[in-house]
Image: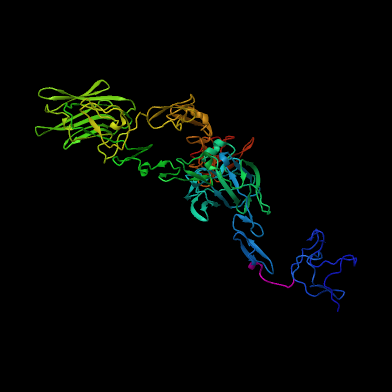
Amino acid sequence: MDQAAALPEPGVVQQSLFVGAIGWNRASGRVEDGAEDPPAFLGCFRDVLVDSRLVLPGDVPKDSDVQANIVAGCSDRDKCEESPCQNRGRCVSQGWRRYACECHRPYEGDDCAEEYITGRFGNKDLESYAMFSLDNNPGVSVVISMFIRTRQSSGLLLILANTTSQYLRLFLVDGRVKVQVNNFETLVSQNTVNNGHFHLVAVKLEGTAATLFLSAQSQGSMAIRRVQTHPDDLVFVGGLPDSRASASFGGYFKGCVQDLRINSKRLQFYPVSTPVESYNLEKLVGVSEGCSSDNACAANPCLNGGECYSMWDDFICSCPPNTAGQRCEEVKWCELSPCPVTTICQPLSQGFECNILWYHSNRKIKSNLSSVSLSFRTRQSEAVLLHAQRESSHITVSLLDSHLVMEFLGRADNDSLKVTAQSLAPLSDGEWHFVSISQERQIPTSRWIMDVDGHQEYISVSRAAAGDFNFLRDGADIFLGGLSQESGLTFSGCLGPVEIGGLHLPFHLETELNLPRPQEEQFVRGNSNNSPQYGCWGATVCAPNPCQNGGMCEDLFNHHRCTCPSEWTGSLCQDQTDTCNSHPCVYGNCTNLSEGYKCECELGFTGEQCEVEMDMCENSSCNYGATCLKGFHSYTCLCPRNMTGHFCELPQLPASFCVGTRWNYSCFNGGNCSEVENTCYCLPGFTGQW
């Protein structure tokens, strides 16, 4: 027979022949299905002849528009072998050259190629929430599930509510998911979810049991009163329209929610193109598409030259050497070896100190040393100001519990002589104080007198008259700011002129002077590689300004005081003068108190902030089988037909039908008809006309 390589060219014949599909559009190269046309054929043809001429199979030029999607051969290879399902979807073979994909959440579509669109809540700390309405009854078993991503420890996730109550609440407390059913039954997850990763959260309500799951792992179950969902119930996601009501559950949620479902029906913030069954979105406030991140580095959180790297809703600081802490706020100053070799570096909260000054006599002192005077300014309660020692003799002037203490131990005629003196008032107040300790010789004893700011503070009487500081004339070490170079600095503050026996302990070295000191008797400063800082200043307590809400900071030497605007109070102006300005009472009226506020709750609500809805039926005394009807202050028991009484605790006795001369009537609870019209004989325990 004659063979043809292809169908006749258009125009040669008047009729058209379609093989495998009806309605082929030559211009578009597609099948245009009509309403009544059968679907396109999927399979193989062989030896298709028209007027004894071979139509299929045949060789057709590549640019021909007379056929499409036809290949030579007839393969029955399983389509699943080509792994058509994306994103770990499971391919299920459904016969010859057909398959279906079972998609893992949150993916959807024929090939699992489409991902459910994430809703971003609380972007830039704005209030946001979504509201859906139910258009069906989900059934006896209700499973609510969603992916969440957050770094916040608290916030409202979801609320199911009808016209009278919120019967299911999901919110975060300390980074854990908390489930509350019917206002009272509560279950909290064992694991936290605020680490910035996606977590699948699911709550299953089935009969009288509720179970919480995190990433398919059970977090516990609890017994509940049966929950019934109805059409027109509302689902709030991320928050409530009332910000005060949202505050009761940790405030608005900040993070991302994806693939939210009730059973198998979706709640979509932004619908995907794949048609899926979804509940109606009623409101979308402040929820953006995707899962973007706030720029946590915009506020420059890294200190001391640290470099900020933004993470999702967080940041990490790359700290320079010798710094530490999340924000590089801890400087390990002493690892930088800032002090001379003759001193010991002492780390402090605001830096370091290494100014322990060491002195000794020039071996030419002949004057009697019987006094010490100095001035100082500090807020330390424990510190050593001056210590001098030779062998077993020593003198120490220090701060102990903010009081100045002098301790002197000398030797006279081989008997130990110990003298102590202490100031009456505390001196660690950041002000300058001038102290003089001197000996008043008397026979047979000597008195040591401590004078603070011109007031005699303490008198100590020694046991012998020979006590003095002459052991410092030769071979003794004198230290300012600590007990020794090895022990390290203990004093943080300012020292004014220091004298022993009228001789100064110089702060300047001879090499720093234009002329040498001419006096013969001198104390000489050692550790020449170390220099004190001249002047007196404290830490920069007002930079940055610690006072909040527009408060003015006053520097009081290592201490600050905030002068607050009239509407703020507290040490940092952190408390409102009118504590009710923030509307803390959710369902109640606020009253200012001297320390805080008090909420007077509306009827039906309780709690410190009137945030808890009261359930008067929770501990009702209604008998078994009775229905509790709750009110604002009390409840009523609705009895079954066979029970009566205030709590339905009494059986309902039969009634008697009575025929009277004027009308018929009934006697209830076992009462009998009487001869007198319209009255009954009642059983014991009952009274009344009927």
- Is 462 left or right of 203, judged from the image as shown? left
Residue 530, horizontal then vertical, whole percent? 31, 37
- Is 486 left or right of 589, judged from the image as shown? left
Is most of the magenta stretch helix, strand or loop?
loop
Q: Up-down: is 638 above or below 108?
A: above
Q: Up-down: is 552 above or below 604?
A: above
Q: Is residue 652 something that shows in the picture?
A: no
Is 73 within the magenta? yes
* Extreme residue in the front direction: 515
Q: Residue at x 60, y 51 (%)?
A: 261
Quadrant where the C terminus is found in the figure: top right
Q: Magenta segment range?
A: 72-81
- Is 487 left or right of 66, judged from the image as shown? left
Residue 123, horizontal then vertical, whole percent? 58, 42
**Which colour scheme appears in the figure?**
rainbow
Q: Up-down: is 260 above or below 339?
A: below
- Is 665 left or right of 512, judged from the image as shown? right
Front residue (pair 237, 373): 373
Q: Quadrant of residue 593?
A: top left
Q: Is residue 456 something that shows in the picture?
A: yes
Residue 560, horizontal then vertical, whole percent? 40, 29
* Extreme residue in the top direction: 454
Front residue (pair 350, 342): 342
Front residue (pair 634, 373): 373
Q: Residue at x 50, y 55 (%)?
A: 217
Is 199 within the magenta? no
Residue 263, horizontal then vertical, whole percent? 60, 53
